[in-house]
Image (cartoon, rainbow, N blue to C red):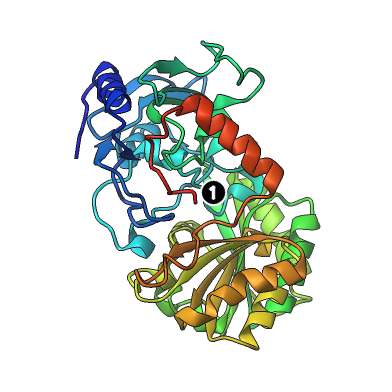
Amino acid sequence: MLIPHSETDAAYVIRTAASEGKTLALCGGNTRSGFGNAVEAAETVSSRGLTGIVDYDPGEMVMTVRAGTPAAEVEAALAQNRQMMAFEPMDHRGIMATTGEPTIGGVFAANVSGPRRLIAGAARDSLLGIRFVNGSGEIIRAGGRVMKNVTGLDLVKLLAGSFGTLGFLTEVTFRVLPVPPSIETIVIADLDDEQATNAMAAAMALPVEVSAAAHLPPTVRHHFLDGALPGSAATVLRLEGLSASVAVRAEKLAAVMQAFGSVTRLGMEESKTLWREISDVKPYAGIAEKPLWRVSVAPTTGHRLVAALRLEAGIDAFYDWQGGLVWMRMEAEPEAALVREQIHILGTGHATLMRAPAAMRPETPAFEPLPAAIAALSARVKQKLDPVGIFSPGRMG
């Protein structure tokens, strides 16, 4: 593995590889190794040598960090000023069965987000600026250099979620938020998936500023808070903010939710633990032999997808993002193709294969095939940013 320790070194490594036609797999802490389609590259280049906080002004709530800086180091620096990353990034090490330290560049390259995406968006929505090395070995600052034939495209947004296929991130600048002084979670017990979908929709329609909404069916409920959640299933709604405000909003929300089922309330520490476990997909950590899907759908259709699949396959699932994100574990490899078939029947959503046995990967693409027009645009952008095609070949399909 090649680990450059400066942006100039990274540019030299990439420029040399481009001149030799040598392909490169790009990574940060390599904690998402195995995700995406198989990459066949001559070398792996990691940003782990590019570390340190370049600039941080708590008053402006903006931070600039070198891409290889551990995400935990960034979070610790923010915590000293009672601030946080708005998008609540998940830690993939559990479900990917990897070790090492996630890097802040990897977080943005994968466009990671957690339960707060409902109100704060994903990583790319907090990203203000980047520095990266393109496939020709040139150092690019987004907005600081106009690249021929890509004018009008937002390079910041393009690099976020590109999984190392468009450029080697060296630096990121992003917005942060204050840590809420109070957190409370409303728990509604014993709802089935459809009832939970209706309850979450009702909660989101209220003027109480729900910051996260999830449903934990009976098959997974016991994995959270060491099984301490009430009932056989738990529908959970998070409120954040000033203590007095949270108390008032929690009373209003609990009163409305009582029409759906038995309501209990969790305090701040239990809430923190619960939502970290939801973000990190705790029920499916360390079970690498089972296919794991991440399905994005309209919040009102997730339960219908799961119900349709249960008629044909052995699956286990839970819901985040008000039901718009379904984490789904399949019991058998041959059943995996049914996921995309059912999404096509529903007419909405897309499925990403997060983890699968090695034998399954060649036959099942990790990502949904792009529509022809978007695929053509993606190919043009790829050709401009990585003209020789050396970055992570095959990862996106």
Q: Quadrant of the N terminus?
A: top left
Q: Toward the viewer: 388 or 114?
A: 388
User: As drawn, is 83 to the left or to the right of 154?
Assistant: left
Q: Does dot 1 land on a helix, a strand or a loop? A: strand
Q: Where does the image place residue 383, in percent across and percent down from the top left?
A: 51, 29
Q: Is residue 329 shown above or below 213?
A: below
Q: Name the residue: 67% across, 20% down.
A: 152
Q: Name the residue: 30% across, 26% down.
A: 14
Q: Where does the image place residue 305, in percent across and percent down from the top left?
A: 68, 74
Q: Where does the image place residue 150, in percent across and percent down from the top left?
A: 60, 21
Q: Toward the viewer: 300 or 12?
A: 12
Q: Name the residue: 30% across, 44% down.
A: 41
Residue 300: image quadrant is bottom right
Residue position for label 1 = 182
> Is residue 126 visible from the viewing direction of this image?
no
Q: Where does the image place residue 393, in percent across and percent down from the top left?
A: 40, 43
Q: Toward the viewer: 150 or 203?
A: 150
Residue 281: image quadrant is bottom left
- Could you tell me the amino acid type at mark 1? Ser
